[in-house]
Image (cartoon, rainbow, N blue to C red):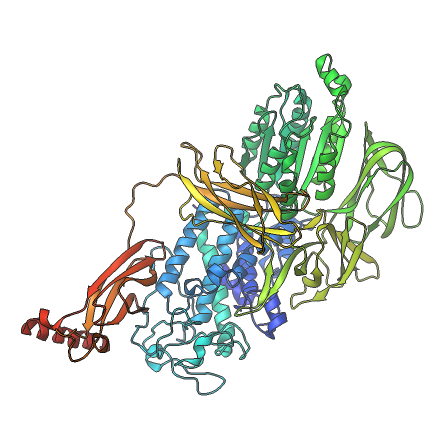
């Protein structure tokens, strides 16, 4: 466990950091753009600031082994920027690509709390409706799940949990009266194991008065603030707001029209949305401080190295290999070992901190090795033995899919094989994973028919010449390469791994040519490009590189068989460079360089409503649905700017769209409209500040899908040995196909998938609950890990029209028999007595009621009537929960069903008091009990 970290540095940084943009608790940057709240903080602002503060704190505590320490004074009084922090620690060549992408995951998970139906209106997620105890219990459960995900190395799942936790934590300061009570510090009881919030307002307490004017100042009842009682505003219709309670307020809250009128939210600095807008800045400051505190307190339970992995801070991309281990691959395996050793132990450079290895052969693949220990990775490489085989094809795509699931986004996977793929039906899911995770895939293919004798050589001579076309297409659409080599050249060819093991690699040109003869290809060099390398694979008869002046450039040319590598010496002339190629056979040309400037992008759509914002698509953009493209610039100097984004489709058509600025200088948006079905490439264009053109293209091809898939589950505690778990799959179509074939799989073949539905057909509706399926865990398995379930839907008539999704499930040990805690209740009071005879008045004219005290440590989520007729009201009462049932004497018995937030259930029973059943002394006793209860509540 990491030691407890002093708060001195965090407070120092917090006090000196300049807040970005304006002065949110609304979801993200688009809220300001859309909702006239430019001077407000958003959840995005608070979350990014907290992550940057804690990252700088950790890096200050851990000196770089080969560089000078960070000077904290360089950051005081300035807005923290991811690029600046990483360059100060790792050097000028550092790229913030993966760090920015990881922050984006956390920010989007935070914003989705306001977008997803399961959390948008849940008062526990936002500390609304006085659900303060239950809200904190939910935070503590989420914190446990976050830690479980880190232990299982599911850092992407942990980022989802972290974003959700920070959202609720930040909302506490905007939705409660903590600020109005005059508190200058954060509530340290929140999300803190072993602690619980206290001093809560009771159900009988009037917490607010009607707002007297549009400013809505001083509308919290004097009794509440004077006695430091904590309350929060009710929102909407559920749960119902009692008389005299506070509302959330704002134009989207219907409860603001019921007493007490108005509201108390401090979400924005605009009076239009926030009745207490004048306290927004104070709430934002505390919310930021609480977010930093939560992240710092996590270091009690996880190491600093795990914390940096969680936040996406790394010096180099993951080293990820997929290796064919059949008998003909001995030389390739030796070359892979050598390259891995050179990368891990290169001088004056930190090694990668994440390693993936997936072997494959025929008929199997795996097991997966995922580790942060370089010695363990090298030991597993040393243990690989080239054995067996002798026939084609092999399970390459199965192994590649497994690597794609576990390799961090924005990395590169290297596949080593000499055989074609046996499992080509996985192509759609592999392509979807490449697109979603923004991963390059490069294939190193050994083609040497003469190196073996006898049956092996004869087999190769009968193989189809186009058997590697699938690999070529996957490499091209991912921005990777396909390189053909032979036994003698494999050592030199694998040097490409070392050259590509940097975050700041940018693709400058990718060409796949089938034409023979002469051709000229153009690429652009700007002031930020260095270390440019050209890779040509094919039978090239001649090649020249021309600088922008039209002169032949002197280059370093290395050729091994069909593979040619050309390096250009820095500094390079800015402008258009060209490559003239003479060839007799098809070839590929890949040009890459290193640059501090790059970009990230994602597609999303605008969402209005109670918390307007921009929703990021979780998988592929959807064809035919209006979309917006968000571009995040990395390492763009202040003098430079981006003006346009290009979408180039496979048919050759290019759409140029203007990029519009937002309140954050690094974020730009373009309204795309309706995307057509099919592949496209995304590029950005601008100027570098000196009049020269800036241009970058994303390596991976994008693809607009015509359907959307969603896997849902209510799994609370993880899959345990021998258990079966039910899951459901929904498909929504947006295209013309009315029939889809469904394929389900997991990344661990020991887990079985059971389903009776292999295809779905659409009638009049566009949504279909495609299937329910079971996941069955083996009786023995590795626990504290994650299982990934993948689902693909492909059109029955055109398999290129497909969509994809995946769901991660925790795998845990079967828990010991721990008794479940069920909600229960105790009767507090009765009101009303049913007469012995209904004459002369009918039973409906005799009301009766009962009040229960509801009990459950995690809170009661809902109450409903199982038997009997009447109405039920469930409300919090400080640290208690009261349930009021009202009926008439026509229904003298009631049974209530109580559901806790941990999904356990309990029952309450009561029967109306009857005059005939009460002796005179009991009647007197009931009267006295009622008087005492009223006195206690009034006290």
The answer to whether residue 304 is seen in the rendering is: no
The answer to whether residue 884 is seen in the rendering is: yes
Q: Nearer the viewer, residue 97 or 6?
A: 97
The C terminus sits in image quarter: bottom left
**In this picture, residue 598 sits left or right of residue 927:** right
Give how far across and how far down residue 587 sits, in percent.
Answer: 83, 35
**In this picture, residue 763 sits left or right of residue 726:** right
Residue at the (13%, 76%) spot, across then down: 927
**In this picture, residue 566 sits left or right of residue 240:** right
Residue at the (44%, 48%) spot, across then down: 147
**In this picture, residue 501 sits left or right of residue 582:** left
The N terminus sits in image quarter: top left
Q: Is residue 825 above or below residue 447?
A: below
Give how far across and how far down residue 777 sits, in percent.
Answer: 43, 36
Q: Furthest residue to the bottom? A: 212
Q: Furthest residue to the front? A: 839
Residue at the (29%, 42%) spot, across then down: 817
Give the total of numbered labels: 0
Give how far across and how far down residue 219 sits, in percent.
Answer: 41, 82
Give how far across and how far down residue 268 sits, in percent.
Answer: 53, 73
Q: Nearer the viewer, residue 717 or 23?
A: 717
Q: Nearer the viewer, residue 217 or 850?
A: 850
């Amino acid at each position: 466990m990491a030691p407890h970290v002093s708060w001195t540095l965090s407070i120092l940084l917090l006090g000196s950091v300049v807040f970005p943009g304006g002065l949110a608790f609304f979801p993200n940057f688009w809220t300001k753009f859309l909702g006239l709240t430019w001077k407000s903080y958003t959840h995005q602002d608070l979350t990014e600031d907290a992550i940057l503060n804690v990252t700088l704190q950790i890096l200050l505590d851990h000196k770089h082994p080969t560089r000078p320490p960070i000077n904290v004074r360089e950051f005081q009084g300035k807005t923290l920027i991811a690029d600046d922090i990483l360059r100060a620690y790792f050097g000028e060549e550092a790229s913030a690509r993966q760090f920015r992408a990881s922050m984006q995951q956390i920010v989007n998970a935070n914003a989705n709390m306001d977008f997803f139906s399961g959390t948008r209106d849940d008062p526990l997620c936002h500390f609304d409706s006085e659900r303060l105890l239950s809200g904190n219990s939910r935070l503590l459960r989420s914190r446990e799940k976050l830690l479980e995900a880190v232990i299982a190395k599911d850092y992407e799942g942990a980022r989802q949990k972290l974003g959700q936790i920070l959202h609720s934590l930040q909302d506490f300061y905007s939705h409660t009266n903590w600020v109005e009570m005059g508190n200058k510090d954060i509530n340290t009881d929140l999300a803190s194991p072993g602690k619980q919030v206290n001093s809560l307002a009771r159900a009988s307490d009037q917490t607010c008065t009607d707002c007297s004017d549009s400013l809505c100042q001083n509308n919290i009842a004097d009794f509440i603030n004077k006695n430091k009682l904590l309350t929060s505003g009710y929102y909407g219709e559920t749960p119902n707001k009692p008389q005299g309670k506070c509302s959330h307020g704002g134009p989207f809250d219907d409860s603001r029209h019921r007493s007490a009128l108005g509201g108390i939210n401090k979400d924005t600095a605009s009076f239009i949305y926030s009745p207490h807008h004048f306290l927004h800045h104070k709430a934002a400051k505390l919310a930021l401080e609480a977010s930093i505190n939560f992240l710092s307190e996590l270091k009690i339970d996880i190491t600093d190295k795990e914390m940096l992995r969680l936040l996406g801070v790394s010096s180099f991309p993951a080293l990820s290999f997929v290796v064919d281990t059949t008998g003909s691959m001995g030389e390739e395996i030796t070359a892979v070992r050598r390259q891995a050793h050179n990368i891990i132990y290169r001088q004056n450079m930190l090694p990668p901190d994440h390693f993936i290895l997936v072997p494959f052969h025929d008929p199997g693949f795996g097991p997966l090795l995922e580790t942060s220990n370089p010695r363990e990775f090298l030991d597993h490489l040393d243990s690989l033995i080239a054995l067996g085989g002798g026939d084609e094809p092999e399970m390459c795509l199965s192994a590649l899919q497994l690597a794609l699931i576990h390799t961090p986004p924005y990395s590169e996977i290297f596949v080593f094989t000499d055989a074609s793929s046996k499992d080509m039906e996985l192509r759609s899911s592999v392509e979807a994973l490449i697109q979603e995770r923004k991963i390059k895939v490069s294939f190193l293919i050994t083609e040497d028919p003469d190196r073996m004798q006898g049956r092996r050589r004869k087999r190769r001579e009968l193989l189809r010449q186009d058997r590697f076309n699938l690999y070529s297409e996957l490499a091209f659409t991912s921005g990777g390469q396909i390189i053909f080599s032979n036994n003698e050249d494999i050592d030199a060819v694998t040097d490409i791994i070392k050259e590509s093991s940097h975050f700041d690699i940018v693709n400058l040109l990718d060409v796949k040519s089938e034409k023979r003869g002469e051709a000229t290809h153009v690429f652009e060099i700007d002031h930020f490009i260095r270390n440019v390398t050209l890779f040509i694979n094919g039978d090239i008869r001649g090649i020249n590189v021309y600088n922008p002046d039209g002169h032949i450039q002197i280059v370093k040319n290395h050729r091994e068989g069909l593979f040619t590598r050309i390096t250009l010496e820095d500094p390079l002339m800015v402008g258009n460079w060209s490559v003239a190629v003479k060839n007799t056979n098809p070839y590929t040309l890949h040009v890459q360089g290193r640059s501090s400037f790059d970009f990230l992008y994602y597609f999303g759509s605008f969402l209005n409503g109670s918390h307007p914002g921009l929703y990021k698509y979780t998988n592929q953009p959807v064809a035919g649905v209006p979309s917006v493209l968000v571009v995040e610039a990395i390492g763009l100097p202040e003098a430079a700017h981006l003006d346009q984004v290009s979408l180039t489709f496979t048919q050759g058509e290019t759409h140029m769209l203007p990029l519009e600025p937002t309140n954050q200088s690094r974020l730009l948006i373009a309204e795309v409209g309706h995307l057509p079905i099919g592949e496209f490439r995304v590029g950005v264009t601008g100027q570098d500040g000196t009049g020269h053109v800036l241009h970058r293209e994303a390596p991976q091809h994008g693809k607009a899908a015509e359907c959307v898939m969603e896997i849902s589950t209510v799994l609370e505690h993880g899959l345990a040995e021998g258990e079966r778990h039910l899951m459901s799959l929904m498909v929504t179509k947006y295209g013309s196909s009315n029939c889809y074939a469904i394929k389900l799989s997991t990344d661990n073949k020991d887990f079985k998938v059971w389903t009776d539905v292999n295809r779905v057909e659409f009638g009049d509706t566009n949504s279909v609950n495609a299937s329910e399926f079971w996941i069955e865990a083996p009786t023995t398995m590795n626990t504290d890990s994650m299982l990934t379930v993948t689902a693909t839907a492909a059109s029955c008539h055109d398999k290129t029209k497909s969509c994809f999704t995946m769901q991660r499930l925790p795998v845990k040990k079967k828990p010991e028999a721990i008794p479940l805690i069920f909600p229960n209740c105790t009767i507090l009071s009765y009101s009303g007595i049913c007469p012995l005879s209904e004459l002369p008045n009918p039973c409906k004219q005799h009301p009766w009621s009962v009040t229960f005290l509801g009990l459950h440590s995690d809170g009661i989520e809902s109450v409903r009537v199982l038997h009997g007729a009447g109405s039920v009201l469930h409300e919090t009462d400080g640290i208690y929960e009261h349930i009021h049932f009202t009926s008439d004497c026509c229904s003298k018995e009631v049974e209530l069903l109580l559901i806790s937030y941990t999904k356990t259930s309990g029952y309450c029973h009561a029967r109306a008091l009857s005059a005939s059943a009460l002796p005179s002394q009991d009647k007197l006793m009931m009267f006295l009990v009622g008087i005492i209860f009223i006195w206690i509540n009034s006290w």
